[in-house]
Image (tube, rainbow, N blue to C red):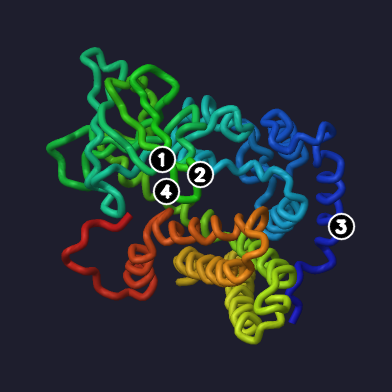
Amino acid sequence: MELGFGSAFDAFREEVREFIKGHWPPADGNFKSHENERAFVVAAIERGYMHRSIPKAYGGSEQPSDIVKAEIIREELTKARAPSGRIPGNGLVVPTLLEWGTEEQKQKWIAPTLRGDIVWAQGFSEPNAGSDLASLRTRAELSADGSKWIINGQKIWTSHAHKATHMFCLVRTEPDAAKHAGISYILVDIRQPGITVRPLVQMTRQKEFSEVFFDNVEAPADMLVGERGKGWNVTRSTLKHERSGIATMTWSLSMFRDLVKLAREVEYDGAPAIKNPRIREELAAIEGQLLSLTYSTYRATSHDVHDREIGAFQTMPKVYMTELAGRISKLARDIVENDFVDMGGERLKWIERFMISLSMSIAGGTSNIQRNIIAERSLGLPRDKTQGAPA
């Protein structure tokens, strides 16, 4: 069985590697510079290596669809730790605008978003609207002259809101409509007066999430995406891309390599942890689970390349990878907890990774909700009559 991409793609892989070597690392050695990242992304778009499916008219590279080439590019960018051009919120709003936006909205927002000049936060969850997102209460009213929306309310668990310039936001525009109706999808500039962003300090000491308050915040009437009161349909597109993004296997492969490296370096009961029978057994089990995900993904990719139906697999990776990341993090935690000599540096990062892994069963749709989706949409099981419409 040939599990590689084949010799036809070897030259393309080498071409991508040479491009990356010529543009990354940056000459000044500043890996965190926004300008350096932006320059790399712009060069990659010009060469056709980034934002390949997006038309040139909207700032993309407009390349023919080729899933294998796209995977090779992703693999090489990951190996080189080069910018991927994927900013979490940006990767959600762009495909949503391509599907639902007006021509004017596409022209105005997509290109600067791809370059990273605009950074988007996702304004969905609220204190009383998490998994049951349709319970949201943040409201938007159209001004008397119809020129702008006036928004009041609160969002919470808003990823990277303290770094964002804009937000794609779900608001209730028809308060008397049924629960899943009367919701609209509006783009908002969150640098304006009336917006208060309060970062939430997590147990890892990071400030990834924020709560955001709206006090008579304004958004031009043409910032509405899709039809008024039908934002729930637009939201499905955003969530589809969010869940597929979380399910990528590249991160899991990298995390497992780091885990094996940790097990070789850290002592466990007076010897390298990797020599401990229990740890070796768990490493083997994790690798088996990871290979199952990897080759299932390759199989799904092969089906996609040949225009065959992927089937139920497309709904499963998010839950599978959530559990896999938790298993990797838990073993790493057990390894470093047994080494009391040095808990700094890489070892401390693993403790933080473990704490972060606990949130993955919630982020992008809880695991319970995902299992409902698998049961109902993929396996055809009957819906629970007490449930509302699934996201």
**Residue 235: horizontal and vertical position, in percent?**
37, 45
Tell me if mark 3 has few (under 14), some (14-19) or many (20+) residues whose alpha carbon lies within 10 angstroms of its own.
Answer: few
Q: Position of residue 85 (x, y in %)?
A: 64, 41
Q: Are marks 3 and 1 in contact (CB under 8 Å)?
A: no
Q: Is label 2 or label 4 in front?
A: 2
Q: Residue furthest front?
A: 341
Q: With respect to residue 324, does 91 lie above or below?
A: above
Residue type pointed to by label 2? Gln
Q: Provide residue 340's location: percent of width, then percent of height.
A: 62, 65
Viewer-proximal residue, 110 or 129?
129
Q: Amino acid at mark 4?
A: Ser
Q: Give the quarter of the image for residue 63.
A: top right
Q: How far separated are the C-alphas under marks 1 and 4?
A: 27 Å
Q: On the image, numbered disc 3 is attached to which residue?
A: 11
Camera-near label (3 vs 1) is 1
Horizontal side of 20 relative to 50 (left or right) equals: right
Q: Which mark is residue 313?
A: none
In three-dimensional space, the C-alpha distance between marks 3 and 4, rounded to whole angstroms, equals 35 Å
* Residue linked to disc 4: 237
Q: Which quarter of the image is occupied by the N terminus?
A: bottom right
Classify mark 2: residues with Cα within 10 Å, few (<14), some (14-19) or many (20+): few
Q: Is residue 176 above or below residue 66?
A: above
User: The disc labelled 1 sits on which kind of residue?
Assistant: Leu
Q: Which mark is residue 206?
A: 2
Few, some or many residues within 10 Å of mark 4 (<14, 14–19, 20+): some
Q: Choose the circle earlier in sequence order: 1 or 2.
A: 1
Measure how far apart labels 3 and 1 are at the Cα level: 47 Å
Judge whether residue 308 can be spotted in this image. Answer: no
- Work out how far the residue at label 1 is from the one at label 2, CA to CA, in angstroms: 8 Å
In the drawing, what numbered circle is on residue 200? Answer: 1
Q: Residue furthest left?
A: 176
The answer to whether residue 194 is above or below residue 156 is above
